[in-house]
Image (cartoon, rainbow, N blue to C red):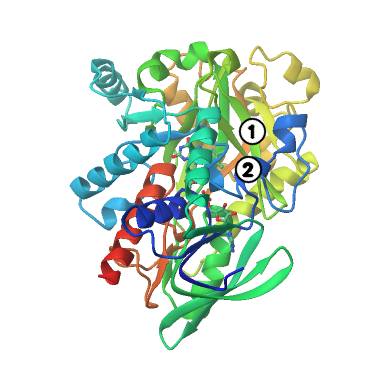
Amino acid sequence: MHNKYDVLIIGAGPAGIFTALELNKTNNNLKILIVDKGRTIEKRKCPERTQGYCSKCAVCGITSGWSGAGAFSDGKLSLSPEVGGRLTEYMSEGEAQELIDYADKYYLGFGARDVVFGLNNQRVEDIAYEASKHAIQLIACPVRHLGTEHAYKVLKEMHDFLINQPNIDFWELTKAEDLIIEGNKITGATLVSKGERIELKAQYVVAAPGRGGAEWLKEQTDKLGIITENNEVDIGVRVEVPNSVMDHLTKDLYEAKLVYYSDSFDNKVRSFCMNPGGVVSGEHYDGDVAVVNGHSYADPSLKTKNTNFALLVSTRFTEPFNQPIEYGKYVARLANMLTGGGIMVQRLGDLLKGRRTDYDRLKKSTTVPTMQGAVPGDLSYVLPERYLTSITETLKAFDKIAPGLYSRNTLLYGVEVKFYSSKVKVNNDFRTQIDNLYAIGDGAGITRGLMQASVTGIVVARDILGKQG
Ligand SMILES: Cc1cc2nc3c(=O)[nH]c(=O)nc-3n(C[C@H](O)[C@H](O)[C@H](O)COP(=O)(O)OP(=O)(O)OC[C@H]3O[C@@H](n4cnc5c(N)ncnc54)[C@H](O)[C@@H]3O)c2cc1C
């Protein structure tokens, strides 16, 4: 085991992987170590997906390990800078687009399917026109859809390529505990690797811990006096309906990114992560908070009869409150408390009638839930009224362009929470105030999707290469 590297990358998600890919492309003399608290890709397992139950693993196989939260995602690569993060706060739209196209070539090179939805399509304009009549905004964004099984393969190809480079090491089950600085310069990090404590020296440290490591990064930045800003927290539900309700939107767009401002509260509500023919799934944070998510396979034989998508209400809390992530987890825990630790499901009709969905009522639902383990319940005991009302008003509005959405058999799973990590103060190359320490990806509050996270890795790699001269 070496304990001195040129570059230490904390987190083997897309942000970390693309840092390594881009560094290695230009300079394969740099000694690079990638660490992840989760497992290597082929050892990542989710009992919920294989055996139908969540065993609340200490390190969630869905969000941690090689390829990060992206391993089991269905790999929708958003090819526009408008979607998936805040890249354009750090560069022009043109530069962001160029980097996205560049990163996309990496994905294609590692085997991504050459299928893009929503590109040069008159239907997309027609849908946007129709939506605008009902105060709904359609955010047009071409999407390359890998599919759950292909996303896994592409990220595994990247793994196999990188670990076969003589200058690159990957340590699984290795958690970064503390960043070490001398003066105002990073010199390495304390790692705990398979029970062993290691003080690892590195000239550059790239913190790419994803949403699952956001709190760790916040602790570290607070300790080091790096400024962070509250990000918004998105709280809502995952909606599941028969494909027939959404098909006319998803056929051309794959994912219809719709935005509506709720009638009562004027809160921004948006659809997110749409999965035609998909399944609703769960994921865990910190081993104890279960939140809902969804994905879909590209293989037609694995398609279901349902489409699912998140409907999220965005809130940016202002001073003095500074714990948006904790707030989101608190709401998620309420649903967990009422379901014995899992995900809750309710029919829209029951919610509107002010009654719980129980197993008998769920059986009557013509939309058959794809998440077997979801427990029927009452979301009004979980979500604050502001959120619940905004969600039902938005479903009613969306029903105008997707008739059948505001049906009593529409299923709502709770809760879906997107914890956008505190935004770490970085410059346009994602350098923090500490020399040679970078913060990127979802964990730094800069991105919220595979593509933009990948781009942040490329930017950092180029900056490090530039410093090398
Ligand atoms: C089910 C699901 C579906 C999704 N679908 C899509 C999609 O279709 N399209 C899309 O664009 N995005 C999707 N996303 C989001 C996407 O996966 C993330 O935006 C992206 O993975 C973020 O990349 P990242 O590298 O910043 O962080 P992550 O991918 O979260 O990776 C961070 C890694 O850091 C590790 N880590 C954290 N803390 C430490 C520490 N202290 N020490 C060592 N390791 C640490 C974690 O274990 C993790 O493996 C999905 C996410 C989920 C969970």
- How far across and how far down the image is residue 449, in percent? 43, 44
Q: Is residue 350 above or below residue 175?
A: above
- How far across and how far down the image is residue 275, in percent? 51, 26
Quadrant for the N terminus in the image: bottom right
Confirm if mark 1 falls within 8 A of ligand 1. Answer: yes
Q: Nearer the viewer, residue 18 or 50?
A: 18
| Residue 269 numbered tag | none
Structural crowding at the residue carrying mark 2, measured as other residues with C-alpha within 10 Å and reported as few (<14), some (14–19) or many (≥20): many
Q: Is residue 5 left or right of residue 80?
A: right
Query: What residue is shown at x 79% (from left), y 23% (from top)?
Result: 359
Residue identifier under label 1: 281
Residue 136 appears anywhere in the view: no
Amino acid on which disc 2 is placed: Ile
Q: Earlier in the sequence, mark 1 or mark 2?
A: 2
Q: Is residue 47 above or below residue 59?
A: above
Q: Nearer the viewer, residue 10 or 418?
A: 10
- Image quadrant of residue 385? top right
Tag 1–tag 2 contact (CB < 8 Å): yes
Name the front one of labels 1 and 2. 2
- How far across and how far down the image is residue 224, in percent? 48, 79
Q: How far is disc 1 from disc 2 in space, using C-alphas?
A: 10 Å
Query: What residue is shown at x 31% (from left), y 52% (from top)?
Result: 87
Q: Is residue 374 left or right of residue 103?
A: right
Query: What residue is shown at x 55% (from left), y 40% (from top)?
Result: 71
Residue identifier under label 2: 62
Amino acid on which disc 1 is placed: Ser
- Image quadrant of residue 366? top right
- How far across and how far down the image is residue 399, in percent? 45, 19
Confirm if mark 2 falls within 8 A of ligand 1. Answer: yes
Q: Outermost residue toward the bottom?
A: 183
Q: Is residue 76 above or below residue 453?
A: above
Numbered disc 1: secondary structure: strand
